[in-house]
């Protein structure tokens, strides 16, 4: 009996990720960083995100992976009345959530994590696909040659 005869063979194809799925995953990843930052701020601790970066070693010429610090700027701020406001961003561009509205009034800082979790669920459900697509187009327009 051959080695392949012992295995269960099936006909399968990997799921193809659409560009919209990639954009949703990118935004949910950034929202996850905002959630971690908000939780750390609520606990009074310091949040330090890192990412793995491949660099070329100048001595040996080989590529190696190092962890570098990642700057995470908060998407929320406090207005003049003391209310916390949350603005969503895709890359460097703000996302217009509905026509003429680009921010969410959270109220107090205690509601921030719950609001971010609700926004994350909305993004995963595809409720903001048109807005993400528009923001993505604006980001890409900045890279076009003139």
Image: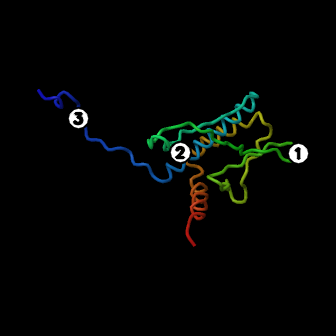
Local secondary structure at mark 1: loop
Viewer-proximal residue, 2 or 67?
67
State yes or no: discs 2 and 1 in contact (Cβ < 8 Å): no
Position in image of residue 24 (x %, y %): 54, 48
Per the image, label 2 sits on a secondary structure element best described as: helix
Residue drawn at (72%, 43%) of the image: 74
122 or 144: nearer the eye? 144
Q: Is residue 104 above or below residue 134?
A: above
Q: Nearer the viewer, residue 34 or 53?
A: 53
Disc marking residue 9: 3
Residue 81 got which mark? 1
- Relative placement, left or right, of 59 versus 29 is left
Could you classify mark 3 by the number of other residues whose Cα lies within 10 Å: few (under 14), some (14-19), or many (20 or more)?
A: few
Q: Residue furthest bottom?
A: 146
Q: Quadrant of the N terminus?
A: top left
Q: Quadrant of residue 145?
A: bottom right
Q: Position of residue 62 (x, y in %)?
A: 44, 41
* Image quadrant where one finds the C terminus: bottom right
Picture quarter containing residue 47?
top right
Q: What residue is disc 2 on?
A: 25
């Amino acid at each position: 009996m051959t080695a392949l005869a012992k295995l269960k063979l099936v006909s399968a194809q990997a799921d193809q990720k659409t560009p919209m799925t990639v954009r949703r995953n990118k935004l949910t990843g950034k929202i996850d960083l905002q959630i971690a930052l908000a939780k750390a701020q609520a606990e009074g601790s310091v949040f330090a995100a890192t990412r793995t970066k491949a660099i070329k070693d100048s001595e040996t010429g080989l590529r190696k992976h190092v962890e570098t610090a990642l700057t995470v700027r908060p998407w929320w701020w406090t207005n003049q009345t003391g209310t916390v406001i949350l603005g969503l961003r895709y890359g460097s561009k703000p996302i217009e959530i509905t026509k003429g509205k680009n921010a969410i009034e959270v109220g107090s800082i205690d509601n921030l994590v719950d609001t971010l979790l609700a926004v994350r669920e909305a993004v995963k459900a595809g409720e903001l696909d048109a807005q993400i697509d528009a923001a993505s187009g604006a980001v890409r327009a900045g890279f076009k040659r003139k």
